[in-house]
Amino acid sequence: MFRRIAARTPLPLDTPYQKAELLFRLHPSKLAALLEMGWEFRKSDNDPLGHPNRRSDIPQLPDYLLEILGADENDFYVPNKDKFSPKNKGLFCWDHLIYAYLIENTNIYEIFRRVIYEYRHSERLGVPLASTQHWLRNTEELFFRDPAPFSIYSVSSYIRPDQGASRRNAYYRMFGMDLNHGTSDNKPYPYEKPDVANREFVSTFEEFLKEVWVAIANAKNTSGSNPKDDATIALLARRLNNMLRTRRINGNLSQEEFWFVSMMSWFHLSLEFDSPIVVSMRAEGSNEEERLKKIANQVKLPVHAKSYYFFRLADPLSRLLTQIELGTYNEVPTVPALYMATIPVGTTPVEKPNEVAQDMNLIINYWSLATDRNMKEKVRS
Amino acid sequence: MTEEKGRPENTPPGASQPDKKTEDQKSLTDKNSDLIAGTLKFQQTKEQKTMENPVETQKTSPILGTPEYARDEFLKIKKALVGPEKEWCLPKVDKEALASSPQLDELPLGEDCKPKNQVLK
């Protein structure tokens, strides 16, 4: 959400970095208005509730309240309003929950919690830069306190007071996975583990990756036996599709997903360049992982050893799981898009490069490295 | 000897004069053949172009359930979510500029964003 807004808003600034800087300086109420806008202009096609093109029917904040939040005076609101909703048709979609899971797995949330704690209680980390003051205020206001009532990101209450537990609950229900870190004193994080969860997600997904790898490795075989099996890939895609869509029936988990991926995109954006907070902490680096490591070092918290792969996996996996939920690969004819290096254009002999297969290659490599389980080991005679 | 009035030069006497209607028909036929030739020429050029660049004629959306359709859908999702990662080739920040002034557009372009294959003199 925030990364997309920073990268894509048509503003007279040269680089996305400058837009991100401007975004960090907005008043928190204006950031809240942007979140409401994203939700208001979500895709609402004529599909079943919970489908990627119609995630939820829950309404956003009414317009008269958005006006109070200064939506019309917001540099990011007006240009995006036209972009997200040309001809009053919502076009906005957000990342898949897997994006939030992978980013949070790096321990980013706890590290930034400690950073804010240190800055608010002492000068051990030095005095933050003037521009960092805006970032600190917005981050604390949006992500480390109770959400504003009636807002779309109000996903905590007396019933579920701890957002950390709510996030873990959502990850567990959707992927059958817990985060790899517990509480700050190294104990398991207490949260409600429901009986109904996609516990077979990981094994099915890994089987899917292995089959796609066999297909990639044998895509160009023209003689002899070819072990690639499009029917099995389609079957596994259908199983994944059924699992994920079942957890989303009638828009279940949509509001939570929207908020959790927005939250993680804010932290991710803060590390994607030498942003004010990174500079304040003298944590300049060449990528997100390097910057996070330096920051974590200063607040004496560990970064997950595989963070580099989590950052690299987050975007491509979000795209793949969105397509799987759309049901794109449920049938055999579309499966070759997952492994063919080029794809023919219509009935012509011309072929275009296939970005789906490029993503699949990345996912297979990084998933293997992140999990220490080799997705390329499948050998079929 | 009287000249037949209106007889064109080099036409033997007694030869039937081409009547105006036939002339008109002929010119019309010529025009038609020119037109047909023109159309053929245009078609040939179009076919040639198609041979050279078939993508130009592929303006309809890909057929549902084909690999091309899947790729097209993927690109739409990619664009809708964040967009090309290249957009995130971001410059490094000048600390002083950050600390002192919010003049964002004056910040220097970092090394990371310079084209990699460019020879800097």
Image (cartoon, helix red, strand yellow):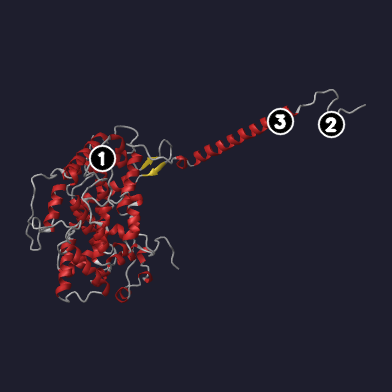
| Helix, strand or loop status at disc 3 | helix
Left or right of B24: which side holds A44?
left
**Amino acid type at mark 3:** Asp
- The quadrant of the image that shows the N terminus of chain B is top right
Which residue occupies the foreground of this view, A177 or A32? A32
Relative vertical location of residue A194 with respect to residue B26 in this rendering, above or below: below
Residue furthest out toward the right = B1
Mark carried by residue A327: 1
For residue A339, say whether it is visible.
Answer: no
Q: For mark 1, give the secondary structure.
A: loop
Q: Quadrant of residue A168?
A: bottom left
Judge depth for marks 3 and 1 and give the one in front: 3
Quarter location, residue A324: top left
Vertical placement of A17 versus A209: above or below? below
N-terminal-most mark, 3 or 2 = 2
- The chain holding disc 1 is A
Any part of residue A25 in sight: yes
Chain on which label 3 sits? B
| Residue matched to label 2 | B9
**Few, some or many C-alpha atoms within 10 Å of disc 1 (few <14, some 14-19, many ≥20)?**
some
In percent of width and height, residue A201 lies at: 16, 44
Looking at the picture, does residue A326 appear above or below residue B18? Answer: below
Discs 3, 1 touching: Cβ within 8 Å = no
Cα separation, mark 3 vs mark 2, equals 20 Å
Where is residue A381 shown, x and y percent of the image? 23, 34
Residue A365 in percent (x, y) is at 25, 49
Determine whether A360 is above or below A23 in the image. Answer: above
Observer-nearest of A293 and B107: B107
The residue depicted at 27 percent of the width and 59 percent of the height is A34
Q: In this figure, which residue is indicated by the disc labeled 3? A: B24
Q: Secondary structure at mark 2?
A: loop
Q: Identify which amino acid the numbered label 2 is placed on.
A: Glu
